[in-house]
Each structure stands twice: as structure tokens, then as C-alpha cells.
Image (cartoon, grey):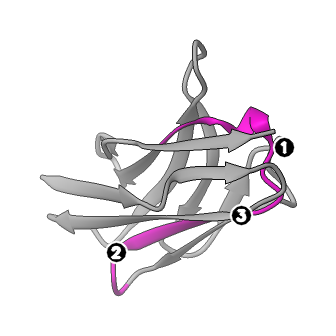
């Protein structure tokens, strides 16, 4: 089993920044993909960004140039630096970890609220 604990959400004004963190513990496979998803109010969950254990990244078009995903493989932690936040970035943000050939684990979610 793998446990994921997110932190760093909160309330911020438009144009501001937040940094989300997600620490993985338990039976963490060294080869995996960690990611951030978000679920805006009344909408479906969507992929924001993901990063492989080798460092390959993907960012959704909606956040490209504003958000940056990174990870520390020693600490089994993934980060999401969010700059130039917009009200439409308001959502519950979820951390994920997918081991090679395995099922995805999810964190409990952290709320990000961007005021205009």
C-alpha cells in the first residue's frame, strides 16, 4: 500500500502563487509516475501535470507556462509550483502515484481557491 499526503493548498488572489506538495510513503515502487489532477466545482477531474521517476514531464495546455511539476525521488515527494493563478484554477487538487503496471493511488485532495 501507498499513502499520499498533500499540503500547500489555500486561498490566494488572482495573480498569486502557491506551491503544492505531496509526500508518498509505504510500498513505493522506485519506477512510477506521479501527477497532479484537479476537480473544479461541478466538473470532472482533469490531469494538470505528471512526471516520471526519470524526470519526464507533461503539463496540460491550460497551465503550461504557469505551473511547474517537479519531484524529489529521495523524499518520494512531488511538487506543483503554481504561478499567475487565475480564478478558473479554483479546484480540489489531487496527487496521484502510478507504479509501472500497477493501479493508481490517490491523495485525499487539497483545496485551492483563487479569488478575483
Label 2 Cα neighbours within 10 Å, binned few <14 / some 14-19 / many ≥20: some
Is residue 100 left or right of 59 when viewed as pictured? left
Where residue 3 sits, quadrant-wise, is bottom left
Is residue 58 left or right of 94 when viewed as pictured? right
Residue 106 tag number:
none
Q: Could you tell which of marks 1 and 2 lies nearer the N-terminus? A: 1
According to the picture, the residue beneath numbered tag 3 turns out to be: 17
The x, y position of residue 8, in whole percent, is: 47, 62
Name the residue nearer the viewer: 46 or 100.
Answer: 46
Q: Could you tell which of marks 2 and 3 lies nearer the N-terminus? A: 3
Q: CA distance from mark 1 to mark 2?
A: 26 Å
Describe the element under mark 3 as helix, strand or loop: loop
Residue 76 tag number:
2
According to the picture, the residue beneath numbered tag 1 turns out to be: 61
Q: CA distance from mark 2 to mark 3?
A: 23 Å
**Does residue 69 appear in the picture of this structure?**
yes
Amino acid at each position: 500500500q501507498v499513502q499520499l499526503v498533500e499540503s500547500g493548498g489555500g486561498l490566494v488572489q488572482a495573480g498569486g502563487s502557491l506551491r503544492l506538495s505531496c509526500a508518498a510513503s509505504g510500498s513505493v515502487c522506485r519506477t512510477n509516475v506521479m501527477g497532479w489532477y484537479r476537480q473544479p466545482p461541478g466538473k470532472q477531474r482533469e490531469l494538470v501535470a505528471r512526471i516520471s521517476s526519470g524526470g519526464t514531464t507533461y503539463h496540460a495546455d491550460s497551465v503550461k507556462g504557469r505551473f511547474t511539476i517537479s519531484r524529489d525521488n529521495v523524499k518520494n515527494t512531488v511538487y506543483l509550483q503554481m504561478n499567475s493563478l487565475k480564478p478558473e484554477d479554483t479546484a480540489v487538487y489531487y496527487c496521484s502515484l502510478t507504479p509501472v503496471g500497477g493501479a493508481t493511488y490517490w491523495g485525499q485532495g487539497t483545496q485551492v481557491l483563487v479569488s478575483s
